[in-house]
Amino acid sequence: GDNTPSSRTIDRIKKRYPLNESQKKKVKRYEKRYPGELGHVDTYYLPLEVSRKRKYIAALEDDCTRLSYTEVIDNVKGFTLGCFMYRAFHWFKKVYGFHFDAVMSDNGMEFKGNDEHPVEVMLKDAGVDHIYTPAYYPQPNGKVEAFFKIIQNEFIRPHTFKNIEEFKEQ
């Protein structure tokens, strides 16, 4: 039918994934040894079906446990993300009792800037190292990207929401 991928697409997909044991051993996966060793932070825009105005989801995910702190935010400015990360750090410390050693983000202007950038200031005050993904290579931050994909496929698409308040409640 119309939804069947071409044989060329299937070949490209097969190249991405290991097919035999020797190829599987070459795949390098990592998981941090203890909670708080590394956090992944990123933002994701909400579809307009959920909110009439542009809104975003911000998430901080612990690499070891895959626990995530998530909020709906109005914009992706540095100050907003700095405040979000402060609340996220506080939540992880209060609820689970651990502190982050480092946080990984992409190179977006909401995360990266000079020493006076709100996110950089907040991380420095919290004693957290800031690691950036290589430019145009988001795979190292893939755990939080996968989290957003799950939110999109298993939560947003199958449901309809009357307004943003109902979305936040759910």
Image (spheres, rainbow, N blue to C red):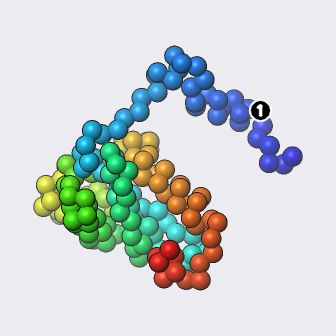
Q: Residue at (49%, 66%) from the top-left corner? A: 45
Q: Position of residue 170 (x, y in %)?
A: 50, 74
Q: Answer with the quarter of the image where residue 12 lies.
A: top right
**Left or right: 33 as drawn, with respect to 17:** left
Identify residue for label 1: 7
Q: Secondary structure at mark 1?
A: helix
Residue at the extreme top = 22
Q: Position of residue 15 (x, y in %)?
A: 61, 27
Q: Residues within 10 Å of mark 1 (few under 14, many from 20)?
A: few
Q: Position of residue 109 (x, y in %)?
A: 34, 60
**Left or right: 82 as drawn, with respect to 59:** left
In this view, 131 is above or below 7: below
Residue 118 is at least partly visible in this image: no
Q: Amino acid at mark 1?
A: Ser
Q: Position of residue 156 (x, y in %)?
A: 58, 67
Q: Nearer the viewer, residue 165 or 65?
A: 65
Q: Residue at (76%, 41%) from the top-left corner? A: 5
Q: How many marks?
A: 1
Q: Residue at (58%, 31%) from the top-left corner? A: 16
Q: Residue at (31%, 59%) from the top-left corner? A: 111
**Left or right: 167 as drawn, with respect to 157:** left
Q: Answer with the quarter of the image where residue 70 lies.
A: bottom left
Residue at the extreme front = 96
Residue 11 is at least partly visible in this image: yes
Residue at the extreme right = 1
Q: Nearer the viewer, residue 52 or 146?
A: 146
